Image (cartoon, grey):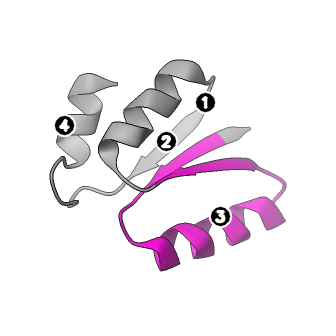
């Protein structure tokens, strides 16, 4: 399973990525909603975990633009 994580806090991204990779998932990370939208349009993800509150564009913006 390929997962996309989108969060503006690096420590959260790295912790989640490490935990999910230990469970043998493939994990990609984006530091903001715009980068996440670009990644989801280029990749084939089974699941996306998106932070709701981020500066500039939030999780709702991501869902509307992905």
Q: Which residue is mark 1?
A: 45
Q: Which residue is mark 4?
A: 61
User: Of marks 2 and 4, which one's residue comes earlier in the chain?
Assistant: 2
Q: Is residue 63 above or below residue 41?
A: below
Q: CA distance from mark 3 to mark 4?
A: 23 Å
Evaluate if marks 1 and 2 touch, with contact meaning CB atoms under 8 Å apart: yes
Q: CA distance from mark 1 to mark 4?
A: 18 Å
User: Of marks 1 and 4, which one's residue comes earlier in the chain?
Assistant: 1
Q: CA distance from mark 3 to mark 1?
A: 15 Å
Q: Nearer the viewer, residue 19 or 14?
A: 14
User: Of marks 2 and 3, which one's residue comes earlier in the chain?
Assistant: 3
Give percent across and percent down for residue 52. 24, 55
Q: CA distance from mark 2 to mark 4?
A: 14 Å
Is 42 contained in the magenta span? no
Q: CA distance from mark 2 to mark 3?
A: 12 Å
Evaluate if marks 3 and 1 touch, with contact meaning CB atoms under 8 Å apart: no
Which quarter of the rendering shows the N terminus?
Answer: top right
64 displayed left or right of 28: left
Q: Tag 3, which secondary structure?
A: helix
Q: Tag 1, which secondary structure?
A: loop
Evaluate if marks 2 and 4 touch, with contact meaning CB atoms under 8 Å apart: no
First to last magenta residue range: 3-30
> Could you classify mark 2 by the number of other residues whose Cα lies within 10 Å: few (under 14), some (14-19), or many (20 or more)?
some
Q: Tag 2, which secondary structure?
A: strand
Q: Tag 4, which secondary structure?
A: helix
Q: Is residue 61 above or below residue 16?
A: above
Give percent across and percent down for residue 4. 55, 44
Q: Quadrant of residue 45?
A: top right
Q: Nearer the viewer, residue 55 or 21?
A: 55
Q: Which residue is mark 2?
A: 48
Q: Which residue is mark 3?
A: 17
Q: Quadrant of residue 7?
A: bottom left
């Amino acid at each position: 399973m390929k997962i996309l994580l989108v969060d503006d806090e690096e420590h959260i991204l790295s912790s989640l990525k490490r935990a999910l990779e230990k469970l043998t998932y493939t994990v990609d990370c984006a530091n903001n909603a715009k980068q996440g939208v670009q990644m989801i349009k280029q990749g084939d993800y089974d699941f996306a975990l998106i932070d709701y509150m981020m500066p500039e564009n939030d999780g709702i913006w991501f869902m509307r633009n992905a």
